[in-house]
Amino acid sequence: MIGLSFALIAVLSLGLIACGDDDDDDGGGGGSTLEKAQEDGVITIGFANEAPYGFADSSGEATGEAPTVAKAILAELGINE
């Protein structure tokens, strides 16, 4: 099941990347979201709050299959929180 979750997140991530704008002149000058997240080491994720796929535990921490896979991918990108 983790393999399926990983594949789903990978496909969705590639879809989001494909929708990105190649234009370097975005008028903001702040860099890409990925660059900013890598600089800060932090990114915000959303989840549907459906156990066991993704839900908040008693301390409010995102847990479950999807957050676990997302955290693993983000760690590879240098984003630890």
Image (cartoon, rainbow, N blue to C red):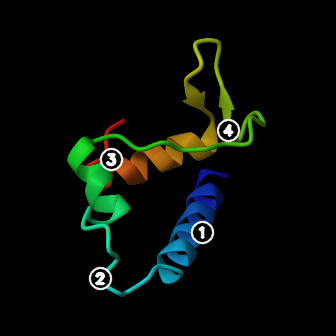
The answer to whether mark 4 and mark 2 are in CB contact below 8 A is no
Which residue is label 1 attached to?
12
Residue 70 placement (x, y as % from top left): 49, 49
Which residue is label 2 attached to?
25
Q: CA distance from mark 1 to mark 2?
A: 26 Å
Return the residue nearer the eye: 81 or 3: 81
Q: Earlier in the sequence, mark 3 or mark 4?
A: 4
**Compared with residue 75, is residue 5 higher up or lower down, i.e. above or below?**
below
The answer to whether mark 1 and mark 4 are in CB contact below 8 A is no
Q: CA distance from mark 3 to mark 1?
A: 18 Å
Q: CA distance from mark 4 to mark 2?
A: 36 Å
Mark 3 residue type: Ala
Tag shown at residue 80: none
- Label 1 residue SS: helix
Mark 2 residue type: Asp
16 relative to 33 in the view: left or right: right
Neighbor class of circle 1 (other Cα within 10 Å; few <14, some 14-19, many 20+) is few
Mark nearer the viewer, 3 or 2 = 2
The answer to whether mark 3 and mark 2 are in CB contact below 8 A is no
Residue drawn at x 48%, y 42% as measured from the top left: 44
Residue 81, quarter of the rendered image = top left
Mark 4 residue type: Gly
Q: Earlier in the sequence, mark 3 or mark 2?
A: 2
Which residue is label 3 attached to?
75
